[in-house]
Image (cartoon, helix red, strand yellow):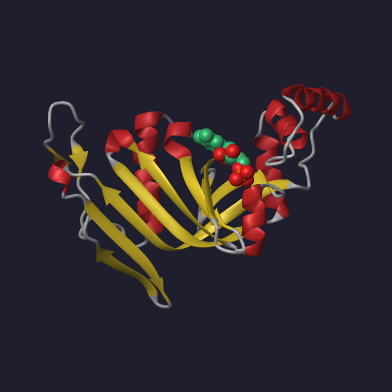
Amino acid sequence: MAEATSPHELALPLLDERSARPDPLDQLRLWLVDAEAVYGPGSVEATAMALATADAVGRPSVRFVLLKGLDRGLVFYTNYRSRKARDLASNPRASAALWWPALRRQARVEGAVERLAAEESDAYFRTRPRLHQLSAWASPQSEVVPERAFLERRLQELDAEFPCEVPRPPFWGGYRLVPDRLEFWQGREGRLHDRLQYTRRHDGWVLARLAP
Ligand SMILES: Cc1cc2nc3c(=O)[nH]c(=O)nc-3n(C[C@H](O)[C@H](O)[C@H](O)COP(=O)(O)O)c2cc1C
């Protein structure tokens, strides 16, 4: 499977039509497993993805979020009043990219974005450390705040307000990006990289090789 590379690089894995999974979400799952083997399970390095949204007039914006689940789509959590959430309310499509430098791999996805069911967000919120839960309440994400001390005071107030369990804020929860196009990019020696693209059709996925 591995290919010889320069002594400064890891042996780069191959990506070809014969070994690629028929379902691109399975392929992404495989690549995530490989990334977690390199960077650690659930590590920021393995799960950080650049998420691009666009507003009602098509102005794009991009930021990193953490990939927290992979089922029929890519699940991430955020504030439902944030800039990205406002973008998604008016234009519920997004694109995301993951980059794993040690493996010379990029994965790109694009598709429709839906909110998770409240119970799904509740279940995930309960697994978060208390400080993370309180920070979700304390932060009016994407709003201008007067100073850092404002957020720290909010955190202390909320700590007193919720002495036991912290409920999920109604303005915080998950989204699922359900892809209709995915691309797997494997860096190769000499810049002749591999790119496999999956496009969703009514009867399944169509696989194509793209020029690097
Ligand atoms: C590596 C990394 C991971 C991040 N993960 C998340 C995340 O999972 N959810 C989130 O809301 N913000 C996350 N952030 C912060 C976002 O990049 C961004 O600052 C925030 O969501 C506000 O974005 P917006 O104003 O475009 O909505 C992360 C930042 C970095 C650098």
The quadrant of the image that shows the N terminus is top left
Task: Tell me which image quadrant ligand 1 sits in.
Answer: top right
Q: Residue at x 83, y 29 (%)?
A: 158
What is the quadrant of residue 93 in the picture? bottom right
Relative placement, left or right, of 55 versus 27 is right
Relative placement, left or right, of 149 versus 63 is right
Q: Residue at x 17, y 46 (%)?
A: 191
Q: Residue at x 51, y 61 (%)?
A: 178
Q: How many marks?
A: 0
What is the quadrant of residue 78 in the picture? top right
Q: Residue at x 57, y 47 (%)?
A: 76
Tell me residue 163's x, y (percent): 85, 25
Most extreme residue toward the bottom is: 202
Of residue 204 and residue 196, the one placed in the foreground of this image is 196
Tell me residue 193's x, y (percent): 20, 49
Relative placement, left or right, of 65 versus 200 is right
Most extreme residue toward the right is: 161
The quadrant of the image that shows the C terminus is bottom left
Tell me residue 131's x, y (percent): 71, 26
In the depicted structure, whether residue 185 falls above or below residue 143: below
In the depicted structure, whether residue 11 falls above or below residue 156: below
Of residue 147 and residue 207, the one placed in the foreground of this image is 147
Is residue 116 in view from this perspective? no
